[in-house]
Image: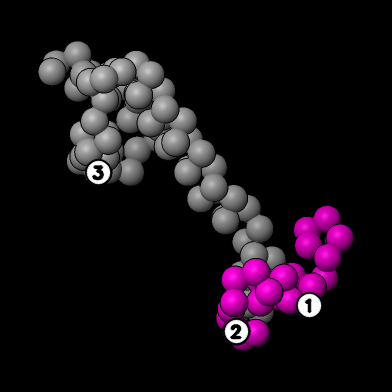
Amino acid sequence: MHRGEISVDDATAFLIEHTGFERANAQAEVFRYTYTPTYQLSYLLGKVLLLQLRADEQRRLGAKFSLKGFHDTLMRNGSLPISFHRRLLAAEAANA
């Protein structure tokens, strides 16, 4: 939509077809995407960065890696930049 390749109606139809949304919900989502086009991408970027952090921790810790421990550390430390989480995870592993 932002490059002019599909219309609002086409995007609405796409969501209806691929998600099962009702027309009103699909249209609301499409309008939300047009009002804040980069907002939704920030969620995807966060997901990618968190998955990369998890993969890095798995490689670094090997058999000592705990998915529960990883999640507990993230939740305990709250909403921080990934670089801060990386340092905190490394410090926690060093103190274990």
Is residue 55 visible in this depiction of the protein? Answer: yes
**Residue 75: mark in rendering:** 3
Magenta-highlighted residues: 1-25
Q: Are marks 2 and 1 in contact (CB under 8 Å)?
A: no
The residue wearing badge 2 is 22
Majority secondary structure in the magenta region: helix
Real-space Cα separation, disc 2 to disc 1, in angstroms: 13 Å
Q: Which mark is residue 52?
A: none
* Residue beneath the point at 62% across and 61% down: 36
**Mark closest to the chain's N terminus, 2 or 1:** 1
Residue 19: image x %, image y %?
Answer: 60, 71
Q: Nearer the viewer, residue 54 or 4?
A: 54
Between discs 3 and 1, the one toward the N terminus: 1
Q: Quadrant of the C terminus?
A: top left
Please tell me whether residue 28 is drawn above or below residue 3 in the rendered image: below
Q: Which residue position holds label 1?
A: 9
Left or right of residue 55: residue 66: left
